[in-house]
Image (tube, helix red, strand yellow):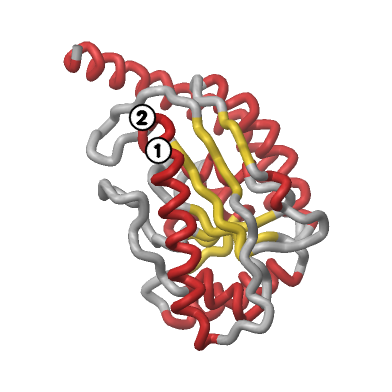
Amino acid sequence: MSRLKNILGRLYAIYGSLVFAANILVMFLPMWVISRLPEPERTRRFFPLVRAWMKVFMPMLFCPVRRKGLENFEPGVTYVVVCNHNSLMDVPVTTPGVPGYHKTLAKIEMASTPLFGIMYKIGSVLVDRKDENSRHRSYEEMKQVLNQGMHMTLYPEGTRNKTNDPLKSFYDGAFALAIDTQHSIMPAVLFNTRKILPPDRIFYALPHRVDFHFLPPISTKGLTKDDLPALKERVFKIMWDYIEQHNSKKK
């Protein structure tokens, strides 16, 4: 059975790669046109397009996305959305899945990726992590995104979680941003993206439904930088406990 599963996983990976390549070629021209627009018009045009695309792309991969907790987004309120990070599939889920307009933080190298890079240029604040000036500029840009009425979606683990634990330890950035701007934090949890692209396998994938849950927001009103460690620990525990409870129900 394991040998058969390995063969099926390789075949599905080939299928997924072909579907992605065909989709990105179709989407490149409209994406390029949108990338020439000024902000915030560029972002406002980008999201209807990418949401329509993913409504086709994810079912083509036999990976439907089910969202829960959308009622936690209060109309007209901007949030710092913090999400766990397990797989390369996370971005295609979170980009169209977070309600309203938003941007992510991405490594500047992603913008040079052929074809796919144009999406990062539109939908992300880019940062060169090795450059202190770039890190400072990206932080200020994230503040501007929030001031423009768009959410910032951040992965506080920094990189993909390849451990067996529900979460890796969090970095300070998302929580410093939320405190500095006094925007509430919206914890968000992804399930099953690692089952689609296991971190310990090369060119191997399997279809699976994805669950994307939004938890009640956490206010930062009146908090200062001295409150950052406690805020980070609180959000970490809320997300950790939620993941464990959700997984235990499925056993």
The amino acid marked with disc number 1 is: Asn
- Left or right: residue 238 compared with residue 169: right
- Left or right: residue 107 compared with residue 38: left
Dividing the picture into quarters, in which one does residue 8 lie? top left
Question: Residue drawn at (41%, 19%), measured in percent from left and top?
Answer: 15
Q: Position of residue 219 (x, y in %)?
A: 65, 70
The image's mark for residue 247 is 1
Kind of element beneath mark 2: loop
Q: Which residue is mark 2?
A: 251
Q: Position of residue 43 (x, y in %)?
A: 72, 53
Query: Around disc 2, counting alpha carbons within 10 Å, would you say few (fewer than 14), some (14 to 19), or many (20 or more)?
Result: few
Q: Of 32 and 175, which appears nearest the observer?
A: 175
**Residue 141 in view:** yes
The image's mark for residue 122 is none
Kind of element beneath mark 1: helix
Q: Quadrant of the N terminus?
A: top left
